[in-house]
Image (cartoon, rainbow, N blue to C red):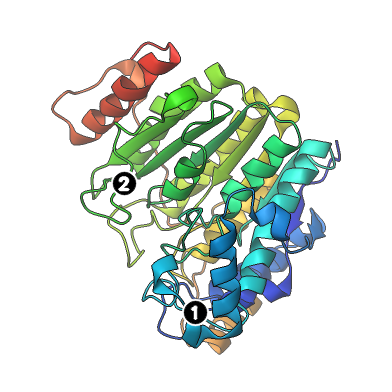
Amino acid sequence: MSGRAQLMWDDAVTGYDFGDDHPMDPVRLGLTMSLVRSFGLDRAVDVVAGKPAGESTLRLVHRSDYLEAVRAASADPRAADQGYGLGTVDDPAFAGMHEVSALIAGQSVAAAEAVWRGGTAHAVNFTGGLHHAMPGGAAGFCIYNDPALAIARLLELGAERVAYVDVDVHHGDGVQAAFWEDPRVLTISLHEHPRTLFPHTGWPEETGAGAGEGGAVNVALPAGTGDGGWLRAFHAVVPELLADFRPQVLVTQHGADTHFEDPLAHLAVTLDAQRAVMEACHDFAHAYAENGRWVALGGGGYAVVDVVPRSWTHLVGIAAHAPVEPETVIPSSWRDEVYARTRQLGPARMTDGRVPVWKPWEEGYDPADRLDQAVLAARRAAYPLRGLLT
């Protein structure tokens, strides 16, 4: 395999724009790529623009009638059919919506193809991770489900075991639904509890069905969970499942909306803990996936200046084997760009000033602790179905 990671990027992805008042501001994508360049990480990776996902690829996950509805809304936003989740408050229709959504999906599919075919061991598409879109509808700011499309393409190419780990604050419901009965795909989602956050799914009892029973694992974290609990839950579930499953490819989704500054959710995770999970996913790819195959995606994140660009720049650096140290000072040129584009002051360093620590699960659990209850519920629901001890 190539010694260099691939970073998927096309300037046109910033056209994924639901409007001025929508929380998913595309400035987060442009500022992330600008910060990547400010640190010279674009020279440590191969920057590649994938082609838009075509009809046959999109139909690996999405129904043809839904694709037709997206195209119609893309051509005339006033004709958006809300029965497909289009033209809603969460997913307003806009001109060119199909084209740019297919472009973002195409980046994730191209990343999966490159990793599978040996062009690179690691590929990053931080513009992707749009995990809520369903086969027949848009949801949660997501038109096409690029993580599911990337996994479906891997299966089409011959993969027999693909693991998907989703650490976005919202449950990865669309990816889970796409592979609910498919034993070739293991989906693991750590997210805020469905009682308190959209999409109100991701209960530990959701474990898959049919041949795929035991193929879905959900850790529903109590609101307010911070670094120690988040990392404890992650390490209490993810490595053991991956070690057992031995995926040929690891696909991860790194929504930045677990952060304590995110306006749409209620976890209290720092940038430093997010970086620690990224490093762990990189290590897991080398430890458990064949030839270190790793496709890393972005996702949610609505603190578009302070959090998202720093978080995903760390992701690119880790995948490139050129990690940015947390104490690194951010170039003033980038901060000037932030102010020029947003009239906000950008962060000064690549850290929130924390050193994440957590207590390993193996040291015992507290049955009265809500975080430990969440971990134990996930293990008790899914582990026996996989032949693992809880």
Image position, residue 313 (x, y; %): 61, 58
What residue does disc 1 label?
93
From the viewer's side, name the closer residue of 202 and 374.
202
Relative placement, left or right, of 263 versus 139 is left
Image position, residue 284 (x, y; %): 59, 29
Q: Residue at x 29, y 38 (%)?
A: 203
User: Circle 2 — which element?
Assistant: loop
Tell me if residue 279 comes above or below residue 243 in the rendering: below
Q: Residue at x 85, y 42 (%)?
A: 119
Tell me if residue 132 comes above or below residue 33 in the rendering: above
Q: Are marks 1 and 2 in contact (CB under 8 Å)?
A: no
Q: CA distance from mark 1 to mark 2?
A: 25 Å
Q: Residue at x 33, y 67 (%)?
A: 263
Q: Which mark is residue 328?
A: none
Image position, residue 278 (x, y; %): 55, 43
Q: Which mark is residue 201?
A: 2
Q: Which circle, 1 or 2, is nearer the viewer?
A: 1
Confirm whether residue 328 shows in the render: no
Question: Dot 1: few (<14), some (14–19), or many (≥20) neighbours within 10 Å?
Answer: many
Tell me if residue 37 comes above or below residue 377 in the rendering: below
- Amino acid type, callout 1: Ala
